[in-house]
Amino acid sequence: MIRKSHIAVAIAALLAAPAFAASFDANVELDTDYRNLGRGAAQGGRVEFNAAGKAGTDGFVAGRASFLAKKDSTTAVDDMWVQFGNASGDLKLGRFEAADIFPVGKDTVVEDDGAAGYRNMLRGRYGNNATYGDGTAHAALTLNAGSGLAVELGVIAAHKNTAVRPVVSYSMDGFTVKFGIDSGKTPEGQKIRGGGVTVGTTMAGAALNLSYNAGKVADLKGSSVGLNAVIGAAGVGYIYDRNDVAGGGSIKENNVYVAYSLPLFNTGATITPALAYSKATGTGTDGDAKITARVRVNYAF
């Protein structure tokens, strides 16, 4: 039988071993929410522990794992991947998020009111709009063509069904554009066809992004348009979603979200008040807006 003391000694030895060239960090994030529509107050959060390392120069091998201890007493793994390659290209395998073609900026809280649109399908880790879960194989091959041009080919395989997601990105002088295509099937065998484009720029201390994603899962179409800005400690964003409804009709939705981070006693910790508004119209909706107020405390240690 392995005793807790043995486990503690093993962990301490791993942390102290210089040969691994690893880095370790952790942070706690606690959210206190208030939602309208009769749901009232709630609290959630997690402690995140990260282990990462990288070795090599001309060629390299890197790895990362992020473990979560949640307030609801459950545990989970966020990232868990290995990556190897060189300056010309690399291959990443495991649980991770691939290229972001629908960034949402300072998304402290963003909630849908009936429509999820079509955003970042097949990006990985959480599966986004497709129900990819544990046991899914995820790989991303990235080729750097130079002069700011890169191509990423993501492949997700679950059960007997596979999906691919090529993304082309170009960056120059604070300007970035990414274009991606989704093609394949969900684990249940539903066809996925779509893609998106996002354009971002940094100017006068502000980061701005404009994104459009659209596609079809099975026979149901969806689309999303997003515009967001992060200006110092402040963030604001707008998302318009549209989804077909099985049996006929559609749902359209407007989402607005804002957040502002304040320093907490000059400790490096922050407290972030945030507000999200979402209202859907169309087939099966009730006409009521969803409003969420959140206060997030984050402390890295």
Image: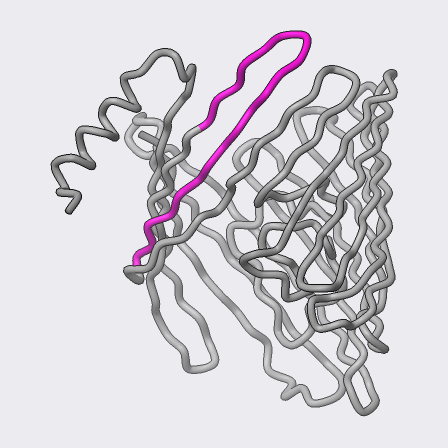
The quarter holding residue 286 reads bottom right
Residue most extreme to the top? 57
Q: Is residue 251 left or right of residue 59?
A: right
Circle count: 0
Quarter holding the C terminus is top left
Q: Residue at x 78, y 56 (%)?
A: 163
Q: Which x, y percent locates residue 124? A: 65, 50
Q: Nearer the viewer, residue 151 or 225?
A: 151
Magenta highlight range:
52-71
Q: Residue at x 46, y 27 (%)?
A: 52
Q: Which x, y percent locates residue 151? A: 84, 32
Q: Is residue 35 a member of the stretch shown in magenta?
A: no
Q: Residue at x 39, y 49 (%)?
A: 296
Q: Is residue 63 a member of the stretch shown in magenta?
A: yes
Q: Nearer the viewer, residue 89 or 282?
A: 89
Q: Is residue 68 left or right of residue 4?
A: right
Question: Is 171 drawn above or below residue 222 in the view shown?
Answer: above
Residue most extreme to the front? 1
Q: Residue at x 51, y 58 (%)?
A: 275
Q: Which x, y percent locates residue 73? A: 28, 60
User: Magenta segment, principal secondary structure?
Assistant: strand
Q: Nearer the viewer, residue 72 or 83?
A: 83
Question: Is 43 drawn above or below residue 209 in the view shown?
Answer: below
